[in-house]
Image (tube, rainbow, N blue to C red):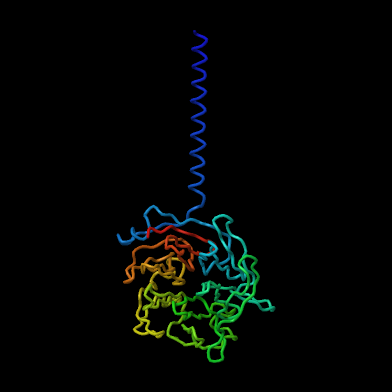
C-alpha cells in the first residue's frame, strides 16, 4: 500500500510539473506573437474625441526600418500589400504581413543614365480608377503611370503629364485622384539637385495643378511657397494642401467646385513649432469619416473636419506621409528611416 501511495504521489507531481511547463510555453508564445513588432513614439490626446479615432492603448508598430528617407505610402487592396518610396536611392519597396519588406521597383523616379544626387526617386504613390500605380517622379519631373507587372515588377513607365505651358515641372511631390478621374498634384522643388535655385528649374513658381480626366492641365494656385501633401474631403468639396515652408508651415483648405478652388484659408498653422520638433507639414490622408491625418512638426496631427486638433502621434522622427487601408482600420506612416502602422478605432 505504501509503495502504491508513493507511486501515486510521484505520478501526481510529474503531471503537475508537466502542466506548469506547458502553460509557461504557451504564455511565452503568446507574448512573442503580441510583441511581434517594436513600438515607436507615443499618442498624445488633446481632445476627448480622439478616443473615437484611435484607442488610447494603440501603439505605433515599426514594420520595417533602415531606409534613407521613406515617403509615399500606398495600400494596394488587390494585392494586400503596402508600397512606399525610399527617395534618395531611387527605389520603391513593398511590405506584406507574410513577407515583410522587399525591393519592388528600381529605378522609381529617375530613369536617366547620367548619375545625379539629391532626391531622384519617386515620392507620392497613388492608384488610378483602373488600379494602375501612378507615381510622382522627382528625377523625371513628371506624373507617370507604371506599365509593368505586379507579379514580376520591372521599371516601365509612361508619362501622364510632364509640362506646364511647355516648361518641365519642378518635381511632382504628392497627388490624389477625384472620383471623376481628375488628378490633383503639387510641384515643389525638392527633387531638383539644387532645390529652388537649381539652374534646371524652368517654372518660376511652385504650383498646385489639376489634370482633368479629358487631358487638360490647369494651374490651381501658385501662392503656396512649398506645396506638398494634398487631399480631398470625402464629399470632394474641399481640397487640403500642406505647405512645407519652414517660415510658413501651414495647411490650407480650399472650397472645390467643378474643378476650381476658391476661398482658401489657413486650416492650421504650425510655424511656431518648427525647429522645436522634427519635421514640417508634409503628406496627409483623409479618412472616409472626414478625419484628417497630416504629418507635421513632431509626427502626425489628427484633425477633425472642422480643423480641431484631436491629438498627435509623436513619432520623434521627421515624418513624411501617411495613408489608410481600404477598410479605414489602419494608418500607415513613413517616418524618416521607418515604416510604421497604428490600428484605428473607427
- Of residues 119 and 71, the one drawn nearer to the viewer in this rendering: 71
Q: Which residue occupies the extreme front position in the image?
A: 130
Residue at 43% from the left image edge and 86% from the top image edge: 220
In-image side of 8 versus 66 (left or right): left
Q: Position of residue 131 (x, y in %)?
A: 53, 71
Q: Residue furthest bottom?
A: 165
Which residue is most to the left? 48
Query: Which quadrant is home to the C terminus?
Result: bottom left
Instruction: Examine the image and state in which quarter residue 297 appears.
Output: bottom left
Quadrant of the rendered image containing residue 221: bottom left
Establish if 235 lies above or below 325. below
**Of the pair 283 and 42, the residue shown nearer to us:** 283
15 sits to left or right of 111 = left
In the image, residue 62 sits, relative to residue 229, either above or below, namely above
Q: Is residue 114 left or right of residue 272?
A: right
Give the x, y percent position of residue 61: 48, 55
Q: From this viewpoint, is residue 116 visible?
A: yes
How many circles with numbers are drawn on the protein?
A: 0
Residue pictured at 51% horizontal, 45% vertical:
32
Using the rendered image of the protein, determine whether residue 206 is visible from the camera's viewpoint: no
Residue ID at (52%, 41%): 29
Amino acid at each position: 500500500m505504501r509503495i502504491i501511495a508513493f507511486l501515486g504521489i510521484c505520478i501526481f507531481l510529474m503531471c503537475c510539473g508537466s502542466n506548469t511547463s506547458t502553460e509557461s510555453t504557451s504564455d511565452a508564445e503568446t507574448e512573442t506573437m503580441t510583441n511581434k513588432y517594436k513600438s515607436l513614439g507615443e499618442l498624445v490626446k488633446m481632445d476627448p474625441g480622439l478616443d473615437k479615432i484611435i484607442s488610447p492603448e494603440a501603439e505605433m508598430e515599426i514594420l520595417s526600418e533602415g531606409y534613407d528617407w521613406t515617403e509615399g505610402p500606398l495600400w494596394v487592396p488587390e494585392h494586400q500589400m503596402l508600397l512606399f518610396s525610399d527617395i534618395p536611392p531611387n527605389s520603391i519597396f513593398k511590405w506584406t504581413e507574410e513577407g515583410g519588406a522587399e525591393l519592388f521597383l528600381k529605378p522609381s523616379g529617375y530613369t536617366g543614365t547620367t548619375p545625379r544626387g539629391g532626391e531622384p526617386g519617386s515620392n507620392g504613390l497613388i492608384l488610378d480608377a483602373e488600379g494602375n500605380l501612378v507615381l510622382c517622379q522627382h528625377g523625371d519631373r513628371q506624373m507617370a503611370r507604371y506599365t509593368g507587372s505586379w507579379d514580376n515588377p520591372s521599371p516601365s513607365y509612361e508619362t501622364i503629364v510632364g509640362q506646364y505651358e511647355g516648361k518641365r515641372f519642378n518635381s511632382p511631390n504628392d497627388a490624389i485622384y477625384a472620383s471623376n478621374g481628375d488628378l490633383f498634384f503639387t510641384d515643389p522643388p525638392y527633387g531638383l539637385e539644387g532645390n529652388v535655385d537649381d539652374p534646371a528649374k524652368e517654372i518660376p513658381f511652385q504650383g498646385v495643378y489639376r489634370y482633368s480626366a479629358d487631358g487638360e492641365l490647369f494651374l490651381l494656385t501658385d501662392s503656396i511657397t512649398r506645396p506638398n501633401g494634398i487631399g480631398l474631403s470625402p464629399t470632394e468639396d474641399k481640397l487640403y494642401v500642406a505647405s512645407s515652408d519652414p517660415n510658413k508651415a501651414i495647411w490650407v483648405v480650399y472650397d472645390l467646385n467643378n474643378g476650381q478652388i476658391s476661398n482658401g484659408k489657413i486650416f492650421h498653422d504650425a510655424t511656431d513649432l518648427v525647429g522645436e520638433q522634427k519635421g514640417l507639414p508634409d503628406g496627409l490622408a483623409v479618412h472616409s469619416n472626414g478625419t484628417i491625418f497630416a504629418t507635421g512638426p513632431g509626427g502626425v496631427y489628427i484633425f477633425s473636419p472642422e480643423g480641431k486638433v484631436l491629438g498627435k502621434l509623436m513619432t520623434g522622427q521627421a515624418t513624411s506621409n501617411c495613408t489608410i487601408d481600404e477598410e479605414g482600420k489602419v494608418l500607415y506612416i513613413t517616418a524618416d528611416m521607418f515604416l510604421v502602422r497604428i490600428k484605428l478605432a473607427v
